[in-house]
Amino acid sequence: MLALMLVLDLPHRASPHMSTSLDTALIALERIAPLELAESWDNVGLLVEAPGERRLRAIHLTIDLNEAVLAEAVATRSNLIVAYHPPIFAPLKHLLLGADRQGVLLAAITEGISIYSPHTALDAVDGGVTEWLAGGLGEGKLQCSRPAGSEPTNSSAPGPGRLLELATASTLTDLLMRIKAHLQLDTLRVAATREHQEGKAISRIGICPGAGASVLAASGAELYLTGEMRHHDLLAALDAGSSVILCEHSSSERGYLPVLRKRLMEELGGEVEVMVSSQDQEPLSYR
């Protein structure tokens, strides 16, 4: 059984004076991140439409949807969860209470909570997750970068990655300090070439939130900034003369949620409370 009675000290409660509909919120979410920008392999949009009342009491933002996040949404009377990572991705053959992911979906439906996911549409859009991540590196010129052979739903749309040409080249040490400050992290994983270890300045940086190896491999960047990367992709990057900074998958994305909250509140005219989950956390830790 899901632990839906989690005791939380929550600063925000849905206001009885606020009101907007699910349909209005869906339109606002698509204005922020048009679904046609999503990669063709992705599963975005309204994934769960709960029966019953369509007036929204509150909206809950999270990177990952799990039991703790759902319990928090229930406690705050939220009836729309915007989960950046799609909680329905691989095909479902059944819905069982004993299965963690499926149980969360069933519990959300039982509680009358709908679920929406923007995922790669929110990466690709101007001012989205990728550009927010790039914003911590310094001033420069941004251009789009996409994986070879990958296409969005709309083939003319920008890809999920960006290539940043810094206005002023910087050392790896300086860039690490900037990224830690931007993401509010104490540690990062780094695979550095000898030249960058010795202080050679870096100008071209490839950026992709999440798992960005396929997006960044053909970018010609001197440095890759992403969440995670496979061992052999790391070795290939180093062999090609590129250093890599890994900030963990969801840590490369979670800091955007307050930005999304502000944008969604503006789109909805403050008619419904939008909250960022305090229970949504990076699963990896260093000990």
Image (cartoon, rainbow, N blue to C red):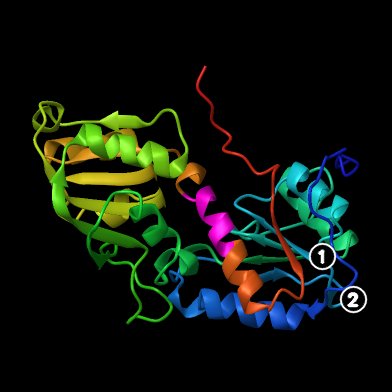
Marks 2,1: beta carbons within 8 A? yes
Q: Identify the residue at horizontal 62%, vertical 71% (top origin).
A: 264
Residue designated by label 1: 79
Element class at badge 1 = loop
Q: Position of residue 234 (x, y in %)?
A: 26, 36
Q: Position of residue 78 (x, y in %)?
A: 81, 61
Identify the magenta region. Answer: 253-260
The answer to whether residue 145 is magenta is no
Q: Nearer the viewer, residue 27 or 148?
A: 27
Q: Nearer the viewer, residue 119 or 195?
A: 195
Q: Identify the residue at horizontal 72%, vertical 48% (top origin).
A: 101
Q: Is residue 253 above or below residue 248?
A: below
| Left or right: residue 47 compared with residue 129 | right
Q: Nearer the viewer, residue 209 or 175?
A: 175
Q: Amino acid at mark 1?
A: Asn
Residue designated by label 2: 53
Q: CA distance from mark 2 to mark 1?
A: 9 Å
Q: Nearer the viewer, residue 218 or 141?
A: 141
Prevailing secondary structure of the magenta residues: helix
Any part of residue 85 in sight: no
